[in-house]
Image: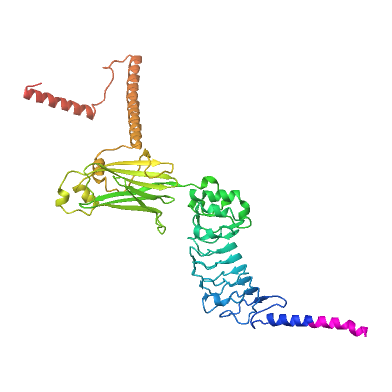
Amino acid sequence: MFQGLYFKPISLWICVLVFILSGFRTISSTCPGVCFCPSITRNVYCPRKNLPYVPNGIPLDTIQLNLNDNNFLNPTISRTNFSRFTDLEQLYLSGCGIEFIEVDTFIDLKKLKWLDISKNRLKSVSDYTFRDLTLEHLFLNDNPGVHISKHAFLGLNTMGLYFQNCALGDLTLEILRPLNGTLKSLWLDGNKFETFNQNWLYLFKTLSHLRIGDNPLHCNCEVAWLFKFFQSTPRVFEGVPAPSCRSPPRLRGKQFSNVTDDDFRCQLPVFKNVDIVFESDKGKLTCLASGDPVPTLYWIKPDGSMEKFYPKMADLSKDTEGVMYTSDPRPTKKSMYQCIASNPAGNVTFSLNVVWPNDDRMQNEPPSKDPIKESEEYPLKVEKEGKIEGQKSEPNDKYISNDVNVTKSSVNMADSREQAKEIRFTLVDIIGAVVGTFLLTLLACVVVFHIFSRNQSRLLYKEQNGLTHSDIKRGPPSRYELDEAENTLKMLDKINRDGTV
């Protein structure tokens, strides 16, 4: 009797355990036929199965779902694809041909920590796509050409954001600003960043891991702050390739670990062309300048008003052109126009003082479209002054005077023709003239000294041998002596005929 009582509790516990296990199996035993679902886990692996869509039969309590390297027929994923997997913590959708992600696709996945959408064909990431998500890692690697909307990450919290090899060059700090409180790891390597504004320093200081290598950085004074940050915080770049320079040519291919502070420098702007062309009813002022970095231009009118011209990002020439039009091209008195080129290295000013003659021909004759011909018909009096300042300042500040050379300028055509008539000697010409004169003088002195020495030797010889001039035998007269005698006779004969001396 006691033996039977002893086994009854054990049997009861076995029955309870079997019931629990059977109940658990009814919940999680389902698994798509092409997938792999390890026992006692809640993971589902379906990579590289050529699936055209998210398969049916995935357990609702799955915590890890791997759908990598499948080719979905529909390139757009939406909320209906994953909303039922509320326990999902890791979702892998790499290489599935995804082009678009609808807003709130993952909003029901409150436990999601790891989201990988790498190696797809994403065209863009819209505003609020990842709102209400708290992730540890968001992978968007290898989506070349993807456009990130301004508010794409608004409402997202993530510790890691990965944009490796996405051909990004226009990702602004404003896009990443919503992540400032949580972001600790950022990958921007393998993209098209030529520079980083110094405002990025605030974000970079909050990171524990940063990758910005393999970008075509232009290493001038604008990124000197990034080099200093690299030197002062090596732990942030630990274990990854250091940033490197693509330009200027002298620094091409050099990593930050192989350059110095002096290598990060800018160049003052240089004027390449300044043109002013006035017609009867309008005027056109053109200013072209280059520098490193590309300068911003300002045209200052005589009344103090200003027009500003920014560099064109798509212009590969690295020049900035400012074209200003004026509707009153005939001032009654001298008027000054100024073109100012400004970049972080400083400002350069080109000033033009223009005086128009009191001539009504401009109203009676049709305007000429040829700047050179127009200068001949209606010459302008132009006073040019170049000004350079080595420190950065506002365009209206005073500048230190200096000379600036301007080529292809139509305002000084008439003056240039007059200047061409003047004879100008360079320093080389003056040195050559002095040296030539010295050599000729020296040669003349040598010849005179030689003749004098021969005469002295001949006289000394006669004195030593007691000879007089009559004792020296002479040969026949030379041709020169005959010619001289003949000329003397002709002159005497002419005097006798004319009767004059």
Q: Is residue 254 visible?
A: no
Instruction: Tell me if 276 is positioned left or right of 163 in this view.
Output: left
Specify the quadrant that holds the C terminus: top left
Q: Residue at x 92, y 84 (%)?
A: 3
**Secondary structure that dominates the magenta span:** helix
| Residue 344 on the magenta span | no
Q: Is residue 265 visible?
A: yes
Which residue is nearer to you in this view: 192 or 336? 336
Point out the stretch of residues depicted in magenta.
1-15
Instruction: Tell me if 28 is positioned left or right of 303 in this view.
Output: right
Which of the 4 image quarters holds residue 417?
Answer: top left
Instruction: Tell me if 36 is positioned left or right of 370 in this view.
Output: right
- The answer to whether 329 is drawn above or below residue 23 in the figure is above
Which of the 4 image quarters holds residue 425?
Answer: top left
Which residue is nearer to you in this view: 480 or 434? 434
Residue 376 spot, x, y in % from top left: 20, 47
- The answer to whether 352 is drawn above or below residue 365 in the figure is above
Residue 75 spot, x, y in % from top left: 51, 76
Residue 418 spot, x, y in % from top left: 23, 41
Q: Residue at x 19, y 29 (%)?
A: 483
Q: Residue at x 46, y 47 (%)?
A: 266
| Residue 2 on the magenta span | yes
Residue 262 spot, x, y in % from top left: 52, 45
